[in-house]
Amino acid sequence: MAMIELKNLTKTYPEQQRPAVFNVNLAVEEKAIITLLGPSGCGKTTLLRLIAGFERPDSGEVVLNGHTVAGKGIWLPPEKRGLGMVFQDYALFPHLSVEKNIGFGYRGKDKKEQIRSMLERVDLAGYEKRQPYELSGGQQQRVALARALIRNPVVVLFDEPFSSLDAKMREQMRGDLKRILKTAQTTAIFVSHDQKDALAISDEIVVIRQGVIQQQGSPVEIYRYPENRFVATFVGRSNLLQGTVAESGQAVDTAIGTIPCHHIHHHLPGDNVFLSVRPDGLRLAPEGSLIGQIQDLTYSGERYQAVVRIQTTDGQSVDLISHIHARHGVCLGNQIRFEVLPEFTAVIQDDGDGHPAG
Ligand code: ATP
């Protein structure tokens, strides 16, 4: 069953021309972790606030666990929605110990027992007497999560929870949070502008631009098969080539040759299309049909990011980005042969702008 359903949700702030959220339809399954991903100002926080009840929609409905909480003349305030929230700055009470922060406002008779169980769940057993300032950023965040989980929420909402952590802590926190949420079998919605966070933690990613959902899918689907130009360039990097769908319907004819592609939906042979080729889809291969010269090379530990210049059939050239494993030991100026892996190619719509004019 869907734990959260958003139906035709629209919100325009006063004196704003453009809706912050426009006609959003979304279903989040029970126990799923999803991320609302998009650039600054795309409306993801507004969407989270509409779910939480900090904003009222102009139209549409918010349904939580089968109950309409906003829409059709119905309005439930945030405290009645049964949600947990974890904010960017954790919002802990600085003068209260860890256990008091976790138990704050909890009225059950089993309070002590619950606090102990939550501390174990977030790997903070033994830290109950500490003050927030005696904890690292990641530990403070786990206290905030324990405080949310103790109420047994239907969904936990996370607003940019990784943004104040350094890179290493961030990576660890992504793993910790995912594990804790999966163990607790909690449905969770994250808001993020960081594709790495989204790809690492989510079962599903919802990419948003200008208040409109661009694509929803698993991290692998979103990365490998972006549906439009915006998703292809916002989530990871992509090479975009113009072409026409080949006779076979399983490839695209482009200026650098015929590129295999199994992800050609809604298009027929002969249609003009754009093809997205992820850098991981260009693989060094001695028998590969494409020949290019390395124009630029950036080393990042396990792999290089290379810019490869390829001659087109009409005597021009295009530069493609490729990820090359460091063991190949390539150098600037090398001529290389490579092949294109179809699992990293997708035909996209030429524009992700489904937004109304104005
Ligand atoms: P960020 O990552 O920067 O927080 P966001 O994707 O979360 O951005 P929102 O905060 O939802 O985006 O904002 C969406 C749009 O609505 C923006 O154009 C923003 O300026 C506008 N907006 C947000 N809050 C208000 C408000 N209270 N009053 C008026 N306009 C607002």
Image (cartoon, grey):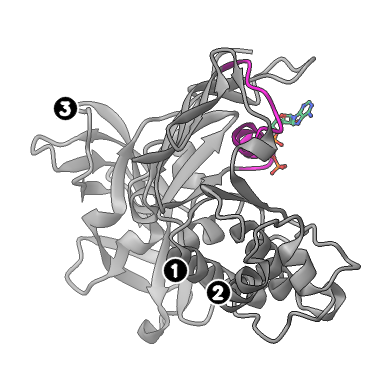
Q: Nearer the viewer, residue 147 or 198?
A: 147
Question: Do residues under tags 2 and 1 come within 8 Å of each other at their CB atoms?
Answer: yes
As drawn, 333 above or below 275:
below
Q: Which of 167 and 76 is in front in this view?
A: 76
Circle 2 SS class: helix
Q: Which of 33 and 271 is in front in this view?
A: 33
Q: Residue 251 carries which label?
A: none
Q: Quick check: 28 left or right of 357? A: left
* Quadrant of the image containing the N terminus: top left
Whether residue 337 is visible to the viewer of this picture, yes or no, is: yes
The three-letter amino acid code for the residue at tag 2 is: Arg
Q: Residue 121 carries which label?
A: 2
Which residue is painted at 72% across and 64% down in the image? 103
Which residue is painted at 85% across and 62% down in the image? 93
Q: Residue 55: x, y in percent?
A: 70, 28
Circle 1 SS class: helix
Magenta-tinted stretch = 39-59
Check the image and name the residue furthest to the left. 248
The three-letter amino acid code for the residue at tag 3 is: Leu
Discs 2/3, front = 2
Which residue is painted at 88% across and 66% down in the image? 94
Q: Residue 183 carries which label?
A: 1
Q: Residue 253: x, y in percent?
A: 21, 40
